[in-house]
Amino acid sequence: MLKLDCWRGGDGSLSQGGRIKEADDRSLAEVWRKFGGNLGQGGRSRASGAKKPGMKEREVLAVYQIVLEGNQVLREKSRPIPAINQAVIRLLDNLRDTLDSTETGVGLAAPQIGIPKQAFVIRTEEDGYMEMINPSILRAEGQEEGWEGCLSIPDMECLVPRATKILVRYLDRAGQERELAAEGYLARVIQHESDHLAGVLCVDRAKEITGK
Ligand SMILES: [Zn+2]
């Protein structure tokens, strides 16, 4: 069963105007209370020891609470990121950390941590981490149905028709423009995460919905 993305961070207003830092700090305080035990050392734990493959060497893990359906930020159109700076790099790192903190998550989009900016992170066994900034799906071919879960909509699964093959253009964390042709599972995950940036949830597209 496909387990897709998602979370919640600051209140949307703090992330306006590039004030990601303040939003981050406030959200982190909330999160440490909630996840402190899981992280092993309370509060800000060191990312040493049992790291997952591909995880960066960093001192502080930034795990956010995931925004749940019903929060308006999930319905906003996320803003493009005009330039790659430290705040953007940190956003990507925070997305990775929070995604890693979930048992089953495959992808996580910035609005799911309360930051309506156009970025998401995907983690798959085959491809490792993929980070996409300002993604744009240039071409889409074919259609197939598949079951999706969403970290923002726990306990629910949706049967969603998606394009079988896509071509997506995006910026990576170095600010390099890239294009990727994806199909099947990866194409589905990219479409799910791209929808988040447009304020669309899988339930909106579902032909069938089941509880778990
Ligand atoms: Zn989702």
Image (cartoon, rainbow, N blue to C red):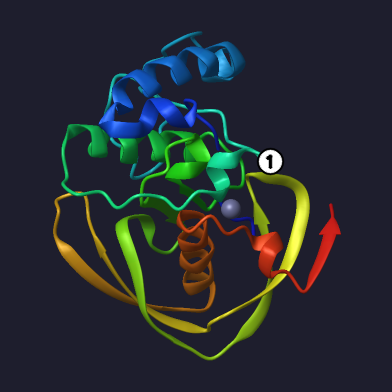
Residue 90's spot in the image, x, y percent? 28, 33
Q: Residue 156 vs residue 111: left or right?
A: right
Quarter-of-image position of residue 46? top left
Decide: few, some or many residues near mark 1? Use Cα within 10 Å; few <14, some 14-19, many ≥20. Answer: few
Q: Residue 65: x, y in percent?
A: 56, 28
The yes-or-no answer for disc 1 within 8 Å of ligand 1 is no
Left or right placement of residue 40 versus residue 81 in this view: right
Q: Along the line of sight, which residue is nearer the eye, 46 or 26?
A: 26
The residue at 77%/74% (across/down) is 207
Residue 20 place in picture, x, y as percent: 32, 28
Relative horizontal placement of residue 134, taking residue 186 as reference (left or right): left
Residue farthest to the right, as pictured:
211
Q: Residue furthest top?
A: 42
Can residue 1 be seen in this snapshot? no
Question: Looking at the picture, how far across and down is residue 149, in whole percent?
Answer: 68, 56
Residue 10 visible in the shown view? yes
Residue at the location (55% across, 38% down)?
7
Query: Which residue is label 1 attached to?
Result: 70
Q: How many marks?
A: 1
In the rendered image of this protein, does residue 124 appear above or below residue 21?
below
Is 3 placed above or below 168 here?
above
Q: Amino acid at mark 1?
A: Gly
Vertical position of residue 93 compared to residue 210: above or below: above
Going by the picture, which residue comes out furthest to the bottom? 142
Quarter of the view holding residue 148: bottom right
Side of 51 where 180 appears, left or right: left
SS assignment at label 1: loop
On the rendered image, what quadrant is the N terminus found in? Answer: bottom right
In this view, the residue in front, 61 or 24, is 24
- The residue that appears at 28% across and 32% down in the rendered structure is 17
